[in-house]
Image (tube, rainbow, N blue to C red):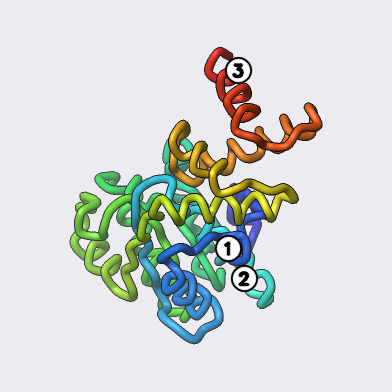
Amino acid sequence: MAEQLPLHFEFRVNQTFNDFFTGANQEIVTHLQQCIAGLGEQQIFLWGKPGQGKTHLLQACCHQAQHQNLSSFYFDLAKAALPDPFILNGLDEYDVVCFDNIQCIAGNRAWELAFFNFFNQHRERGHKLIVSASSAPNDMGIQLPDLRTRLNWGLTLKIQPLTEADCISALIFKADQMGFEIAPQTGRFLLTHYNRDLASLWNLLEKLDKASLAAKRKLTIPFLKKILDEESDG
């Protein structure tokens, strides 16, 4: 089976459900966990703006599938030019399949038809499909009517953005996982002076952690200003 697939997905070890700051999205996490466990919907369509954690959640689904001895596959359709639809061959045999940024196939006739056929075969086997997009199913521009209909099956969930208080809590949560501390006022300073999407904030935390260790200094606001100034100059 696996040899039919020319691509292997990048398994991110730090993107599990335990590593995800839920904010107002605990219900989404619960639905995804129940789906993988076979206790909920067979299909979930997850959508929201970039930087809200869709990739993390799909990776977390694959982690949970692995822990339950289920075969899983993840692919981000926005990472590069669309590959040949051949990568769908054999995927119907996988227990859990996650496609990130499914909107990227909209308008591509070969991909829409191939995905429609994969969808039917995968569903007939009783396997789980979880896809993400930047918009709701009917707003993606899918041209094949039958595929558009199928993408509306199952459960459609919208990720709720984090409030400012949530973002500060998320920074403290993530820093704690990485082994260092961030005070609430420090988190507030970062939100005021830096991009608020989660991916950018996590990348910033990694840089701050390394800078703090190298300088053997705590993450005070004056030290943060120095680091951010150096980054902007660079």
Q: What is the secondary structure assignment of the residue under circle 1?
A: helix
Q: Which residue is mark 3?
A: 230
On residue 64, which mark appears? 2
Q: How many marks?
A: 3
Name the residue rendered at 50%, 58% in the picture.
Answer: 89
The answer to whether marks 3 and 2 mark residues whose Cβ atoms lie closer than 8 Å is: no
Quadrant containing the N terminus is bottom right
Q: Position of residue 14 (x, y in %)?
A: 66, 54
Residue where numbered disc 1 is placed: 60
> How many residues crowd around disc 1 within 10 Å: few (fewer than 14), some, or many (20 or more)?
many
* Position of residue 140 in the picture relative to residue 226 (left or right): left
Task: Classify mark 3: residues with Cα within 10 Å, few (<14), some (14-19) or many (20+).
Answer: few
Left or right of 116, for residue 21: right
Residue 207: image location, x then y, percent: 66, 33
Amino acid under disc 3: Glu
Can residue 36 be seen by looking at this rendering?
yes
Real-space CA distance between mark 3 and mark 2, rounded to the nearest whole angstrom: 40 Å
Of callouts 3 and 2, the N-terminal one? 2
Residue at horizontal 51%, vertical 64%?
Answer: 97
Tell me the distance, in whole angstroms, between the alpha carbons under discs 3 and 1.
34 Å
Q: Nearer the viewer, mark 3 or mark 2?
A: 3
Under tag 2, what secondary structure? helix
Image quarter for residue 222?
top right
- Tell me, yes or no, whether the two marked residues, 2 and 1, touch with CB atoms within 8 Å: yes
Is residue 167 or residue 20 the one in the foreground? 167
